[in-house]
Structures are given as structure tokens and as C-alpha cells.
Amino acid sequence: FVQTPIQIGGWKGRIKVWILDLEDFDFVLGRDFLRTNNPRIDWVSSRMDLIDRQRVMHSVYDLGTPFRELETNEDPRLNLIPAKKARQTLRKKGTEAFLMIVRERKDPTLSDEVPQHSNPRVQGILERYRSVFRTSLPETLPPKRDTEHRVDTGEAPPMNINAYPLSTEKLDEQTRQVESLLKKGLIQPSSSPWGFPVIFVKKPNDAWRMCIDYRALNQRTVKNGYPLPRIQDQLDIVGRAKILTKIDLASGYWQIRMAADSVQKTAFNTIWGKYEWLAMPFGLCNAPATFQGIMNETLRPLLGKNVVVYLDDILVYSETIEEHYQHLENVLSLLQREQLYAQPSKCEIAVERLEFCGH
């Protein structure tokens, strides 16, 4: 190979190239070039954006060779040919061949429901960060982070409240949900001296939500003074932004670990035994403060500039769609880095109006 200067539109640089007979092409940009320069490619508009050493962006249009449209009397179907004939055809000079391997998707919960958008550039961003969107959380504990949820009860002695009586329907539902939480690794069997009863609350869709009655524990817990933002202040910051995106995290509390020394205080009693939480459960008085603190730290570089966050609701705001492309990508990049997952069905992407925290 040789080092050679290259100019693509207004972009100039130097690349290593192998000398080959490419016939109809001057050169082919390979993976090394793409990795080093990380261009943004819009396949729909055939545009490539390259940033030079002075951080100036250069756009190159009309990438590649345009496809010839089929004549109305041409047959667009592909024909099967014997392997022997394929080998003979491939030996002919100038023949182009493409290999495609079809594989079954292994994890159907990963990005099966990436939000859909009519804008190709927005959809391209969502596809690049498809791992952020999940219809259900991974069946594993959240990653270790600098902040974990702690329950500070001071000198209060352990307390253990027996399980409440439940109807047969609720007992069956309790068994189902406990088995699901065990499978996901969010709870584990416990012999803790602490213990609290289970209650059930009807959801709007008539399903049962299993909750732990932590009222007695909360009375003994030292309160965390970390503030939650005022929603009106956040709406004032957003102001008259014209393009908005709302990202709703999936089962947000369950994406936060419990501190090891507080796990036993989350124990809950059932008629089948006792369990304790390894992830942060709903119902603990300081859980909102812990969650808000983690979200603020995750999105710190963007807060008040083009992002506000209230617990598990993230609002991205921009004056123009061009700005929004970058703002949206910045947020998804931070969520991906922290392994925080969004519920695709509850997200609204690049719209002019939406509801945020009831407003």
C-alpha cells in the first residue's frame, strides 16, 4: 500500500491505499477509512458528511452510481441457477457477485419495536441506537454504577410484618409475579429480619400491580433531601422549542441497583416464603430522589441546553429539525453508555406537540 492525499468534495486528507485493478472505480473507501473519519452517511439522499481536522463539516452528494430503472417489459425476479453455472459465470471478467446470509434474530425483545418515524434521518438515528429500546428489561441485574439506592434507618431495629391475607386470584398473581422477578434476577430468596407485606393495586387495563407496603419502613427511614425539579421550571426552560422528543424509560426503578447493605431491608413476606430486592423497588420513600440523581448525572452535559428530565421522563427540545438530529443522538448515546433502556411504545420522537408530565 501507499500513502496518498485525497480530496472528497471540500474535504481533504491522507489515506493508505492498496493498488488494485478496480476497472470502473477510482478507489474504494474501506472500513479503516470509515472507522478513522466516522462519516455520517444518509443513504436516502446519497449524502456523506465528513469533518476535517479543523472541525469543519463537508457534505458530499450523489454518492455512488445511480441505479438504472427497470423497463416495464423487464422481469425483476431473481432466477435460481445450478452451482456449476454460477462458478462458470463468476470466472468471467467483470462479473459482480454479492453474498447474503439470513440469520434468525436471537433476542426478540431487543429493538423489535424501535419507534418508527417518517423522517429518514430520524429513523436512521433510532436504528443506530436500537439497543436502547426494549419491550422488556434484560433478565439480569442492572450494571454497577457510582450511585446505588440505600435505605438509612439509623438505629431503628428490624421489623417484620406478616403477609396480608389475599384472595385466590391475588395469590395466583403473586406467585406468577414473584416467579417472573426471580427469573429476571431482580429479587432473591431471603432470611432477613426485616419483612413487609404485599398488596395489589388495579392498573387502568385491569391487570394487577404487585406492591410492597413499605409505609412502616419509610417512617423509620432518614429522608434524602435531593430535590425533584419543578415541572413548571422545566416547561419554562423548554420555552417555544419547535421540535420535541419524549423518551420514557422502561420500569425505571428496576434499572437501579440496591446497595448491598440495604438489600435485606427491602424484604417482603408471602405465604410461600420471603424475598428481597436486588434492584430498587417501587414504594421506598427515597427512591425518587435516587432515581432523579442518577438521571441528572447521566444527562449532566445536556441539561438545560436541549434536555430536561423528570424521573423516568426525558424531554429533548430543539429550535430546528437539523439541531434535533444531533440533540436526539446525544441523548441516546448517553443512555446506551449507561445501559438505560426506554419503552418504545411510550416514546414520542421529533414531534411538534406532546404531553410531558401531564402538561
Image (cartoon, rainbow, N blue to C red):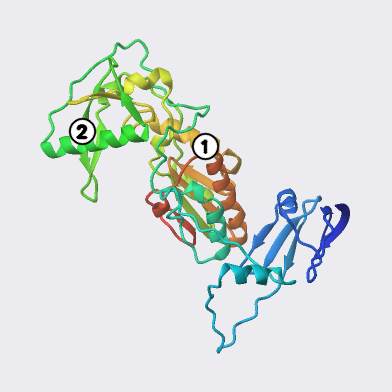
Q: Which mark is on residue 296? A: 1
Rendered view: 244 above or below 261: below
Rendered view: 339 above or below 195: below
**Residue located at (72% from left, 69% from top):** 61
Rendered view: 44 above or below 343: below
- Looking at this view, name the residue that lies furthest to the bottom: 73
* Apparent side of residue 323 relative to residue 60 in the rendered image (left or right): left
Residue 155 position by quadrant: top left
Disc 1: CA contacts within 10 A as few (<14), some (14-19) or many (>=20): some
Residue 164 position by quadrant: top left
Q: CA distance from mark 1 to mark 2?
A: 32 Å
What percent of the width, then of the height, locates residue 139?
Answer: 39, 37
Residue holding disc 2? 199
**Residue located at (54% from left, 50% from top):** 129
What percent of the width, then of the height, locates residue 277?
Answer: 34, 27
Name which residue type carries label 1.
Asn
Kindly state the secondary structure of the residue where label 1 is placed. helix
Kindly state the secondary structure of the residue where label 2 is placed. strand
* Apparent side of residue 211 relative to residue 85 in the rendered image (left or right): left
N-terminal-most mark, 1 or 2: 2
Task: Please indicate, yes or no, whether residue 28 appears anywhere in the rendered image.
Answer: yes
Name which residue type carries label 2.
Ile
